[in-house]
Image (spheres, helix red, strand yellow):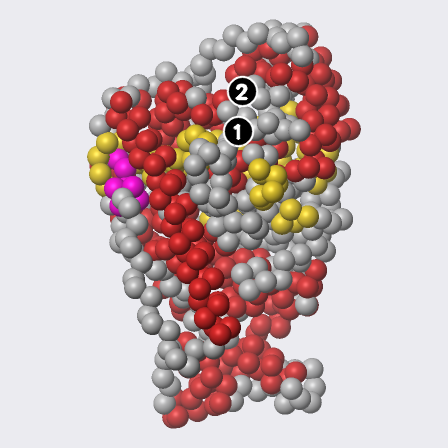
Amino acid sequence: MSFDRRAFLVVSARFGLASTLFPGALYTLAAQAQSQGAATDKSLAKITPDMIDQAAALAGITIAPDQKTMMLDGLNEQRSGYAAIRKLQLPNNVPPAYVFDPLPPGATVDTTKREPVYSTAVATMPANLEDLAFATIPELADLVRRKKVSSVDLTQMYIGRLRKYDSQLHFAITITEERALTKAREADSEIAVGKYRGPLHGLPWGAKDLLAVKGYPTTWGAGGFEKQTIDADATVVQRLDAAGAVLVAKTTLGALAMGDRWYLGRTRNPWNPQQGSSGSSAGSASAVSAGCVAFAIGSETLGSISSPSTRCGVTGLRPTFGFVPRTGAMALSWTMDKLGPICRAVEDCAIVLSAIYGPDEQDLATRDAAFNWNANLDWKSLRVGYIASEFEPDKPPAETEKQAAATTQEEKKKREKHEREMAAFRARRAYDRKYDLAALDKLRAMGVNLIPVKLPDLPWGAMTALLTAEAAAAFDELTTTGRDKLLTEQGVEDWPNDFRIARFYPAVEYVQANRARSLGIRQLSELFQQVDAIVASTNSEQLVATNLTGHPAVIVPNGLRGADAPAPPEVDTGDDDQIGGPGTPVSITFLGGHYQDAKVCALARAYQEATGFHKLHPKLS
């Protein structure tokens, strides 16, 4: 439900995307004037022509003197309404009075639901129970259904691994042992008398700790919310309970769903614990990767399933916007938040999505669309495109301008450091591109006729200010009360600063960005009239575009970097998800049309079965 802003900024810089946070908040200027003594009571200082000049300069517009005079009464009156709304103390679970719909005009949705068709798995019970830690859902389900292993035994095994590896990886906020063992015993009792609920029955899972679970804290990973409790289960939790799954842990997320740093530390990558696991579904991806849960639920707003799935070498499914209800989940961006599974394999994701998707009366963005998983779908009949520009070498950087004679020694050092960092980034990217190209070669060898396609040429990065504006509204109280100081991260790219910047984003520009977004939806949807699925580089502009348009994505492991991989930075600052290093995972992404998640999963599964990269696991000490 969130995004890794640092990773996005790297992508933005690469594609030359500019920020559109054009300040226009006279409210803030008036508040500043008050703090400087311009107001003698608790009311805000009156807006003055000088304030209008300052705001206009920041917004890049010109206002004539006579126009400023005309505006003053209206601006002061408009500003007076802010306090009345703030007195309502709107909680995070109250959405705006509008609903985002990712479908373009004239689009139709299949609503006919059919029984899912799963692959047949016959698993062998190992002598050592922990050898099941990395088993897929069909394998675990087969053993549980045939009573070769009990849900209680699986639950205790996974809880034991959670406790064992949490001190190293920091992926669990709360282990829900009492609840888990109760549900596991219920599952075993039901299965014993023939009441088998399906492939998730008795399987332990982890929930990103922005999902409410009654009786346990829901911390959102943030300082100031450590003891927050919500007296209800999120809809997704309810649906997994109904499927017989066993919740064993609430997993970490970066504070308020940014990055992998939460209020007690940083979640780590099992493949290289010196690195973070990326975010914000940090704990969900890390726990799945480390074999500490059978599957997990994450969320994505702008990369938060994609990024940690890539870093931790697991499989992530970001469903079509509106497929999975978000009731009971922390709201970051009402028009971009999506919940989805993080698992070992694509079919695992399809099984979980089959249990959690569907309309919910509390989340008006959900649609009555069908997800008809068919493991036997003829994927060779699908028309498959690839974003050609993403598989081409990067253009060489422009020549650095000669340093002026007046440049200080400190400035020279900063510039040289930046140039070294960018050179290292380009080297890592060039190395990783080999894996992207190998994926295309493998797909061709499988018989796929790849069709080159082009992402619509739109200012996708400029539209992401929508997310920040909505996030600032979702957490307005933190900024206005100063409680944002409780958040762990306080840097220039972190939420407290972002929330303050967003207060200067004009309502007119918010609407204009949404209109541009409508163009993006129409143009990208037209692309999916030509192809059924698209292969894309994971860490590229498509990540921004498809999150804005609500299209689904499947992120699958694509191998491990070799011993010849460029060395990673000495310190993982969180600025780049693709920091690499020998022995760490890479990924490839498959995209689909709206509510065509089953088709794109079928193609991704075929690739996964042909490569076997999902069977690789980190070696934990």
Q: Amino acid at mark 2?
A: Thr
**Residue contact between numbered discs 2 and 1, judged by CB atoms under 8 Å:** yes
Closer to the chain start, of discs 2 and 1, is: 2
Q: How packed is label 1: few (under 14 Cα within 10 Å), some, or many (20 or more)?
A: many
Mark 2 to mark 1 CA distance (whole Å): 8 Å
Question: Circle 2 — which element?
Answer: loop
User: Of the residues shown, which amino acid type is indicated by label 1?
Assistant: Cys
Compared to residue 279, the image places residue 319 above or below, namely above
Q: Is residue 270 above or below residue 333?
A: above
**Residue 386 highlighted magenta (yes or no):** yes
- Residue range (magenta): 385-391
Task: Find numbered disc 1 in the image and state the secondary structure of the residue it sits on.
Answer: strand
Q: Residue at x 31, y 35 (%)?
A: 437
| Residue at screen point 55% across, 9% down | 123
Check disc 2 and report the residue beneath it: 136
Q: Quadrant of residue 275?
A: top right
Q: Is residue 350 left or right of residue 600?
A: right
Q: Position of residue 41 (x, y in %)?
A: 70, 86
* Residue sticking out furthest to the right: 178
The image quarter containing residue 613 is top left
Q: Nearer the viewer, residue 237 or 415?
A: 415
Position of residue 28 measured from the top left corner of the image (x, y, whole percent): 56, 77
Instruction: Give the residue drawn at x 73%, y 43%.
Output: 217
User: Residue beneath label 1, please?
Assistant: 343
Residue 270 coordinates in the image, percent (x, y) = 59, 34
